[in-house]
Image (cartoon, grey):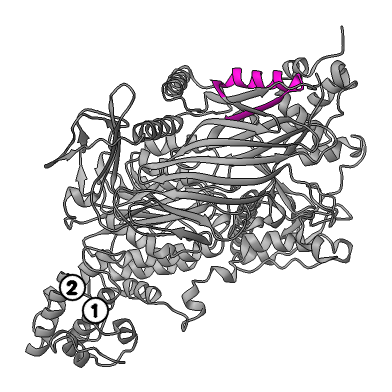
Amino acid sequence: MSIETSFAPVAAATGAPVSLSMQRLWLTGQVLAAGARLVVEHVFRSDEDQALEAIYAFPLPRDAALRSFRISGEGFEAHSELKETAAAVEAYEDGVARGSLATLAREYADGVVNLTVGNIRPKETVTVRLEILCGVELRDDGFRFRFPFTLAPGYHARAKAASAASGEGEMELPAGEFGDVILPGFREDASALHQVGFDLTIASQLPLDEVGSPSHAVRVRQAADRPARVMLATEKDVPNRDLVLDARFQAVAPQVLAGRDQKGVGRFAAIVPSSSFGALQAAPRRVVILVDRSGSMQGAALAQARKAIEACLGALSETDSFGLVAFDDAVEELQGRLVPGTREWRERAHEFLAAIGARGGTELVNGFLAAAKMLEGGGGDVLILTDGQVFGTGQILAEARAAGVRLHCLGIGSASEDRFLTLLARETGGVSRFVTPRERVDLSAVDLFASIGRPLVSGLKAGGNIQPAPPPCVFAGTPVLLFGEADDAIELSWDGGQLKLPVAFENNGIAETVWLLQGARLIADWESRRQSTETPAPPLEKRQQDRVAGRLRALSQTYGLASREMSLVAVVTRSGDRLGELPQTRVVPVGMAQDTEFGAYFPAATSHGTMHAPAGPPAIAGCGMAAFSAPQAEAAPSASPADHRAVPMFERAMNLLTKPKRAMEPPADRDRLGETAEDFLLSLASRMDSDGGMPGENGEARALATAVAALAFLSQGHTPARGAFRSHVARLLKFLESLAGLTPRHQEAIAAVIELARKGAPPAGDWVALARVSTDRWKEVEEEVLGGGVSVRR
Amino acid sequence: MNSSRTLAELSESTGIPARTIRFYIARGLLHGPVKSGRGAVYTAEHLARLEKIQQLQAEGHMLAEIAHLLAGGPPAHTAAPPSAWWQHVVDEDVMVFVRGDASPWRMKAIRLAVDEFASRLREQQTDQTRRKPE
C-alpha cells in the first residue's frame, strides 16, 4: 500500500477507497452561560452515478431545538420552512418524487434527529447549515458546553443489534414506538469517517478565568472584554465523542442577560448562583446511591464509579443513612433498606462494590423504583451514576415523575445522553452533571454528593412572567437559571428568604437569543412528557398525549422552533430535475462512542455479514457446565474441531457477560506509585470513620491522623466551604473540635489547624506526601501551625 | 386490478414510509422500480415483498438478516440457515441450547434462567438423596 492510500479513507474489510456521502461537519456559533446559539455545517457530496439521498442521524444536545437551515450549492441557496411534521414529510416526498433537491430535518423520540437530503446530483456538493439552540450545564463557578459529534447506541429491551463483517454495528428500534427513524451504522474505527471540527466563541457577563476542553485538543484565544474563541487545535477530528468545553468564571455572582425586543418587551435570562441563597446547614441525610452496572459501563466508567461511591460514603456520618443499589436488568441491594453511615456498613458497601461487574441491559426504572422504596416515608435523595445510554426515555421519565423521588444524575460517557439525564434530574427536582470517562469521575461524584441530600432552599418562587417555573429546590453548587420578561427587577422568594435582582438592558440583540433559548428549553421540557408506545393508549392517556402534542405545536409556532410536532423542510426546484428518478439512499455512519465497548451492544461479526454465524454443523460450540455451576468462573468454551471459526465469537461474548475485565480495576490499585494527589485524597476520604475522624490506635493517634488529613485536603484547596471534598473537610473539623484530653501542646496544635481551615488558608508543607507516611508527625504539625508556618520537608 | 403503483401509492398501501422503502431498495431488500424516470412504477411483486419484509420484522428479524433470507436464503422446506448455538449441560441427562447471536442483555437473561433451572434440578436431586435412607 502506498503512503497516499494509507492515509485516504479505505474500507477496513476490502481496502477499497470509501466514498462518504457526508464529508464534513463543522460547528460554529456562540456559547453563553444561559445557552448556546449554534450553526452546524454539514457538507454532503455524491460520488454515486445516480442521485443520492443522504441520511444523517444525530442526537440533540440538552434543552435543544432546531430553528432553521439554509441549503446551498452551486448556483442556489434556499431556506427552510417550519411545517407540521406530516406536512413537512409530504413536502419532502413530493420534492423527491419531482426530482428536486429536498431536505428534511425531523426530530424523533429521545431527541434523535434525521437530517435527510434527497436528490443530490452525481458529483454535486451540497451544504446544509442548521441553526440549533441548546442549553449548557451550569455550575456556580462556570459552565460546561457539550455537543454530540456522534450518536451512542443505547439499551432498549426490544432493540435488535448485529454487526456486519465491515465492522459496523447496526441497531434497530421497534417501529411502533420509534416510527421510521433511521439510526446510523456504528463504526468501531471512526478514522475513515467524515471529519468534524469547531470554531466557537464563548461570551460571559462575568470575566472568564479559564476555558478548556477535556475532550479535544483546543486552541483558545482570550482577551479582556472580548469573547473567548475556541478552535480545534488539529486540522480535523473524528466523530466518536462529544465536544466538551469548560468555562470558569473569575468570580461567583448573579448574571442577568437582558434586552428589549422589537416590541419593547424586556426579556432576560438570569443565572443566580446557589451562594446567593445562603450557606448549607448541616442536617442528617438520607441518600440512596444507584449504580448502573450495565454492559456499556464496562471498563473505566464502572471502575471510576466504584471509587467515587466509596469516597462519597466517607462523607457520611453516623446520623446519616444510606442505601446502595446496583442495577442492570436485575436489581441488587446492599440491604433492602437504608442503613446508618457507620464504619461497619461502609465496609460492607466496599465488599458489595468489589463484587460488581458490568453485564446486562440498562433497566433504569427498576433501579430507581428500588431506591424509591428505600426512601419511602422519610424523603431523601437518589444519586444515579450511569452512562444513560438508553432509548425509550419518555417512558422512563414518566415513571421517574410518578416515583416521587428526587433523582440526581452523574452521567459518565463520551457520547451524549446529556439531554436525557438533564431531564431526568430536572423533572424530579434534582441536579445533574455529565463527565467523560477520561476525567476524574470520582471527584465529580464527590462534589455532587456534597450538595445533595439537603437542599439549600425549598419552595422557590419567582414573581412576574417567568417560564419555565423555577425549580422547587436549590442545591449548593448549582445555580438557578430563569427565563422571562421583566421591566426593572426579578423577584425571588423561598421558605424563609427573598432576593431582588436588578435588570439592566443591553442593546446587542440579546433579547432574541434569550427568547429563543427560552423556547428551546420549554420545548425540551414538554417533549419529555411526550410518549410513544406501541400499544394503543387508554383514552385518558391519549387525551393527555394530545394535550402535550398541542402544546408543542403552539410552542413551535410561537418561538419559530422545530419540535417532534413541527419539522423543517426545503425543496429547491432546479432545471434538469428528473421526475420519478429514484435516488440511492445512504445512511451516514458514525463512530462508536469512545470508551464504550463495541461488544457491549453488538454481537461479534460473522464472515457472512449477517446475524447467522457460519458454525458448520448447526450446534455444539462447547460451553461446559463449569460456567453455570460456578457463576464467578470464566466461561472457557473448548473448541470442537468442527466449529473452530465460531469459538472466538462465543469466547468474546461470554467473556463480556461473565468476566470482569482487567481495565475495570481501579487505576490506583494498578499502580500505587502513579497515584496523584487527588487519588490519595479519595483514599483518605474513603478511610474516614463515621465520627468524622481518621482511624488510629488511640485518641492521640486519631487526633494526629485527622489533623494531617485536614491539612492534606487544605493543601489541595479543599476547605469546609469550597472544593469537591468540602463535606469531608467539614466533618474532619467537627471531629477535631470534639477532641479533649490531649496534651496541652497537641490540643493547641489542633486548635490552630481548625483555625487555619476555617480561614481556608492552604498550609505551606507538602501535606499529601506527609499524610502518606505513617510515622509520628506531631512535630511537623506543630511546626506548620504553631511555628509560624515553617515549611516542612518529608 | 391495476397492479402498477407509484412510490407514494406503494407507501400508502403498505403503511411503510416512502423514505423507508427507498432505504430497503438501497439495502437490497427490494428491487428498484420497473421503469425509472417519468414512469417509475412498482408492481404487485414489490407489494408482496414489502409485506414479506414486514412479516419477517414482526418475527424479530433484523434487516441484515432479512436481506440474507430474501437473497436466496434457503426455502422454507429445507433446514434453517446455519447458526451457532451454545450447549449448556445442565445435568447428566439435561442439555439446553441457546442461540449464540442473541444480544448481550438477552444472553444474560437466558443465563440467569438456566442457572435457576440447573440449581432447581440439583435441589430436587439432593432432596431425593436425603429421602432415600428413610
Asked whether A136 falls inside the magenta stretch, the response is no
In magenta, the rendered stretch is: A81-107
Crowding at label 2, few (<14), some or many (≥20) Cα neighbours within 10 Å? many
Q: Where on the picture, by quarter, is residue A104?
A: top right
Q: Amino acid at mark 2?
A: Ala
On the image, the x and y values in percent for residue A329 come to 54, 49
Amino acid beneath label 1: Leu
Residue in front for this viewpoint, A159 or A715: A715
Q: Which element is circle 2 on?
A: helix
Q: Earlier in the sequence, mark 1 or mark 2?
A: 1
- Tell me if B6 is positioned left or right of A498 in this view: right
The residue that label 2 is drawn on is A757
The residue that appears at 86% across and 20% down in the rendered structure is B37
At x 79%, y 38%, the residue is: A123
Asked if the residue under mark 2 is in contact with the one under mark 1, i.e. CB atoms within 8 Å, the reply is no
Residue sitting nearer the eye, A235 or B29: A235
Residue where numbered disc 1 is placed: A711
Secondary element at tag 1: helix
